[in-house]
Image: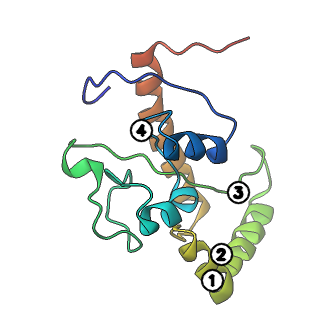
Amino acid sequence: MMTAVDLIHVPYRGAGPALADLLGGQVHVYFAGMASAIDHVKSGKLRALGITSAARSDHLPQVAPIGDSVTGYEASDWFGLGAPKGTPEGTVGSLNTAVNAGLADPKFRARIVELGGVVIGGRPVDFGKMIAGETEKWAKVIRFAGIKPDI
């Protein structure tokens, strides 16, 4: 959308088969998650053309963010914990405290970083703002691409 590059989407059932086809030359480009591709990049089997996060990765510092070439580009995987609307604030607060304590555990943090992740943590209100921003960003992509639900 941001570059007018015309790519054909090839759906895969996971990173394993997609990486196998990329390594085998059946596909020419793949937007892989850091955890699944980093070993192949470090071994020289794959060449990283860019990183989709806004900032360089400590794991692949030689790879520039795509946003350096395509102004405003950023697409990062993220994981979070949610609760149903109306969950009591005390419950949300307790869960948030427990999750942040887990994220502060040095062994857990080290494993996430080893897999190429970034541990953030934080407050529920900040997570809500991040989700709202992501929803707005991806809604533009969905509208541009004319994506419709398959029901």
**Distance of mark 1 from mark 2, alpha carbons?**
6 Å
Q: The residue under label 2 is which amino acid type? A: Asn
Q: Residue at x 74, y 61 (%)?
A: 92
Residue 103's x, y, as percent?
Answer: 64, 77
**Mark 1 touches mark 2? (CB < 8 Å):** yes
Q: Nearer the viewer, mark 1 or mark 2?
A: 1
Q: Residue at x 38, y 50 (%)?
A: 52
- Of residues 31 and 98, the one nearer the viewer is 31
**Quadrant where the C terminus is found in the figure:** top right
Rendered image: mark on residue 29: 4
Q: Which residue is mark 1?
A: 104
**Distance of mark 1 from mark 3, alpha carbons?**
16 Å
Rendered image: mark on residue 100: 2
**Distance of mark 3 from mark 4, alpha carbons?**
31 Å
Looking at the rendered structure, the secondary structure element under dot 3 is loop
Looking at the rendered structure, the secondary structure element under dot 2 is helix
**Distance of mark 1 from mark 4, alpha carbons?**
36 Å
**Mark 2 touches mark 4? (CB < 8 Å):** no
Q: Residue at x 52, y 16 (%)?
A: 147
Q: The residue under label 3 is which amino acid type? A: Leu
Q: Which residue is mark 3?
A: 81
Label 2 crowd bin: few (<14), some (14–19), many (20+), radius 10 Å: some
Q: Among all residues in the image, which is located at the extreme front? A: 24
Mark 3 vs 2, N-terminal side: 3
Mark 3 vs 4, N-terminal side: 4
In the figure, 60 relative to 149: above or below? below
Mark 1 vs 3, N-terminal side: 3
Specify the quadrant of the image occupied by residue 72.
top left
**Mark 1 touches mark 4? (CB < 8 Å):** no
